[in-house]
Image: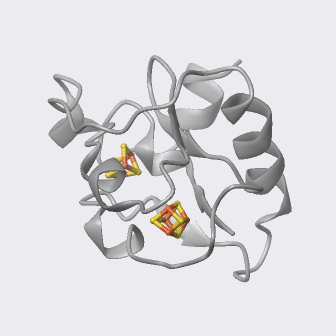
Amino acid sequence: TYVVTDNCIACKYTDCVEVCPVDCFYEGENMLVIHPDECIDCGVCEPECPADAIRPDTEPDMDEWVSFNRKYSEMWPVITVKKDPLPDAEAKDGETGKLAKYFS
Ligand code: SF4
Ligand code: F3S
């Protein structure tokens, strides 16, 4: 599976949702997640993210992100249409510590 990781937080560009063939992105207030059981591993969303927040779970230390994506994809509504990024998206792109700040 692919997963959304911390740099999506407070950016939420949503370019990713338009290309997903199985509509497996789910939307929270500050970020999106991918449902790991619905993702078919096609990889087309990865290069679409301006924040480089989408990673394959084959990279090291991704287990926590898979759990995170699974947990929230079961709580949040599906999103299939692109919308405006969050207002501070450009400033927040690359900021460290966003997970602790927004999900504590
Ligand atoms: Fe959707 Fe493909 Fe991205 Fe998985 S890898 S979330 S199926 S676009
Ligand atoms: Fe987030 Fe990137 Fe999609 S910032 S909303 S994963 S395009």
Q: How many marks?
A: 0
Residue placed furthest toward the front: 22
- Quadrant holding the C terminus: top right
Residue at 55% from the left image edge and 48% from the top image edge: 24
Q: Which colour scheme is used?
A: one colour
Q: Determine which quarter of the picture holds residue 70.
A: top right
Q: Determine which quarter of the picture holds residue 60.
A: bottom right
Most foreground residue, 5 or 79: 79
Residue at 48% from the left image edge and 78% from the top image edge: 43
Please state the horizontal and vertical placement of residue 44, each as a whole percent of the image.
Answer: 39, 75
Q: Determine which quarter of the picture holds residue 87.
A: top left
Residue at 29% from the left image edge and 47% from the top image edge: 93
Please state the horizontal and vertical placement of residue 35, each as a whole percent of the image.
Answer: 67, 47
Residue at 71% from the left image edge and 20% from the top image edge: 75
Most foreground residue, 66 or 87: 66
> Can you say whether 19 is above or below 17 in the image?
below
Please state the horizontal and vertical placement of residue 59, each as a whole percent of the image.
Answer: 69, 81
- Quadrant holding the N terminus: bottom right
Taking the image as shown, residue 30 lies to the left or right of residue 68, namely left
Taking the image as shown, residue 43 lies to the left or right of residue 37, namely left
Most foreground residue, 86 or 94: 86
Please state the horizontal and vertical placement of residue 42, each as a whole percent of the image.
Answer: 52, 79
> Can you say whether 13 is above or below 79 in the image?
below
Taking the image as shown, residue 6 lies to the left or right of residue 13, namely right
